[in-house]
Every structure is written in structure tokens, then in C-alpha cells.
């Protein structure tokens, strides 16, 4: 008799992928694009989402799911910019969101009245890279205060992402950061990566990001 041992991680990941496929089907059925924002802590995900809700919230119905290890602070911040329920997932120590948690959040979201879903993952560039949430695409953020080599130090998340945001470009005159080198590293890791350059805190250089989201919604809805 042949025996095959399946470790716990393999089993959990397989179940996650099944749930992610179901999430993707649900979102597709309602023509809702979903973006999974991943970054290290302090890159500016929450501020980027604050600006996005502030500037696109009147144009589109945006669902928001946030993930944090111990608090719902980010969700509380984002709730100030929308009249819709913000879903806070407190992982209790886990370093990433999973498809089961997104499934639970979607059970409370009326997708027929939702144009866009934005997911703020736990601040971590390692764990979230391996977990499919059923999103349309991952968006990896890094900032001018972190160093140009993030794409080569954490290549998997940059390979798994379709889009990258280089945030805090307003600080370039004050930090030792080489944009050309950062872009080169990103392209080296993922030649197909589309990059955005933003200053979420000041609200400058955000138009291309807003335009991207607007196009994603209108294309999904076939307009």
C-alpha cells in the first residue's frame, strides 16, 4: 500500500484556493473588480485608501475590507471617509488575510450595489504573497522611505502583483532614494508590472491611480 502524507499547510492552502475561486466567481457575477493591497507597515496603504474613498466615494460604491493583527484602527480611520460599512478583520496574530475571511466579509456586502472592492491586507511583504483572496489583482506598495531594493528583497510579492505603487514621492528631496534604481529592480523582478507614483499624504500625483480604478470599474461593468 502506498502512503502519501499531506502536511497541514498543503491542506490549508488547497482549501484556501477553493474558497478564493468561489470569491472570484461571486465578484465576477456582479462585475465587481477587487484589488488586494499589500505592503510592509508604514508604506501608506491606509492613507492611500483614505484618499481613494475621499475622491472616488461619491462616484462609485466602494466596499472595503481591512486586515490587522490586533486592532481595527485602520478600519476606524477609513470609516470616516465612507457611509458604508467597513469590514475589519482582526487576525489575532496571523500575518495575512485568507479567502475564508473575505468570504465572510462578502456575506455582509451587497455586491449588486457595489462597484469596487478594496482589500487592505496585513502589513507584511512575505505572507500575503502566497494567499489568493479571489481578488482581480494584487497591488504592492512600497515607499521612498524604505529603500529601492524592496522588489529584489521580497520578489515573490512583486511577481504575484500586477500593479505597484511607489508612495511618498513628495519626500524625494529629503531622502536618499533612487527612483530609477527602484523601477529597474521592479522591472527586473516583474517586467509586466505597472507602476504608479503617488503622494497619498499630500494628495498629489494621485490622478493616474484614480484613473486606473475608474477604468477598472467601467470596463468590468461593460461601459
Image (spheres, rainbow, N blue to C red):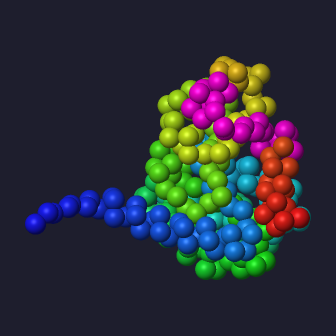
Q: Which residue is drawn at 87% across and 44% down?
A: 207
Q: Classify 130 as above or below 1.
A: above
Instruction: For the N terminus, give its image quadrant.
Output: bottom left
Q: Quadrant of residue 205?
A: top right
Could you tell me how many numbered marks the image carries?
Answer: 0
Q: Which residue is drawn at 62% across and 51% down?
A: 138
x and y, in percent, of residue 32 in the image:
73, 67
Query: Is 190 in the magenta?
Result: yes
Query: Is 208 in the magenta?
Result: no
Q: Classify 65 as above or below 192.
A: below
x and y, in percent, of residue 53 in the image:
80, 59
x and y, in percent, of residue 116 in the image:
75, 65
* Magenta region, residue range: 182-207
List the single residue furthest toward the front. Answer: 1
Q: Which of 148 and 183 is in front in this view?
A: 183
In the drawing, does residue 3 fall left or right of residue 197? left
Q: Nearer the viewer, residue 66 or 106?
A: 106
x and y, in percent, of residue 134 in the image:
58, 63
Q: Residue at x 84, y 55 (%)?
A: 215
Q: In which quarter of the image is residue 111?
A: bottom right
In the drawing, does residue 136 fall left or right of residue 48? left
Q: Which residue is drawn at 43% across and 58% down?
A: 94
Q: Which of 193 and 150 is in front in this view?
A: 193
Q: Nearer the viewer, residue 25 or 58?
A: 25
Q: Is residue 52 visible to the viewer in this orientation of the structure? A: no
Q: Is residue 117 visible to the viewer in this orientation of the structure? A: yes
Instruction: For the C terminus, give its image quadrant.
Output: bottom right
Amino acid at each position: 500500500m502506498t502512503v502519501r502524507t499531506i502536511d497541514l499547510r498543503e491542506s490549508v492552502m488547497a482549501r484556501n484556493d477553493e474558497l478564493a475561486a468561489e470569491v472570484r466567481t461571486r465578484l465576477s457575477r456582479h462585475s465587481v473588480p477587487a484589488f488586494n493591497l499589500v505592503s510592509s507597515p508604514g508604506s501608506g496603504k491606509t492613507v492611500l485608501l483614505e484618499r481613494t474613498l475621499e475622491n472616488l466615494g461619491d462616484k462609485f460604491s466602494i466596499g472595503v475590507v481591512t486586515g490587522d493583527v490586533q486592532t481595527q484602527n485602520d478600519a476606524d480611520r477609513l470609516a470616516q471617509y465612507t457611509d458604508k460599512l467597513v469590514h475589519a478583520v482582526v487576525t489575532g496574530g496571523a500575518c495575512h488575510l485568507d479567502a475564508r475571511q473575505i468570504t465572510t466579509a462578502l456575506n455582509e456586502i451587497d455586491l449588486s450595489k457595489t462597484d469596487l472592492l478594496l482589500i487592505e491586507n496585513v502589513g507584511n511583504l512575505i505572507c500575503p504573497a502566497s494567499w489568493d483572496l479571489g481578488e482581480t489583482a494584487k497591488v504592492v506598495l512600497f515607499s521612498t522611505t524604505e529603500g529601492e531594493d524592496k522588489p529584489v528583497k521580497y520578489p515573490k510579492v512583486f511577481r504575484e502583483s500586477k500593479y505597484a505603487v511607489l508612495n511618498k514621492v513628495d519626500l524625494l528631496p529629503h531622502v536618499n532614494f533612487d527612483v530609477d534604481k527602484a523601477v529597474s529592480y521592479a522591472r527586473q523582478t516583474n517586467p509586466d508590472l505597472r507602476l504608479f507614483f503617488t503622494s497619498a499624504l499630500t494628495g498629489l500625483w494621485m490622478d493616474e491611480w484614480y484613473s486606473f480604478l475608474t477604468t477598472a470599474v467601467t470596463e468590468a461593468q461593460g461601459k
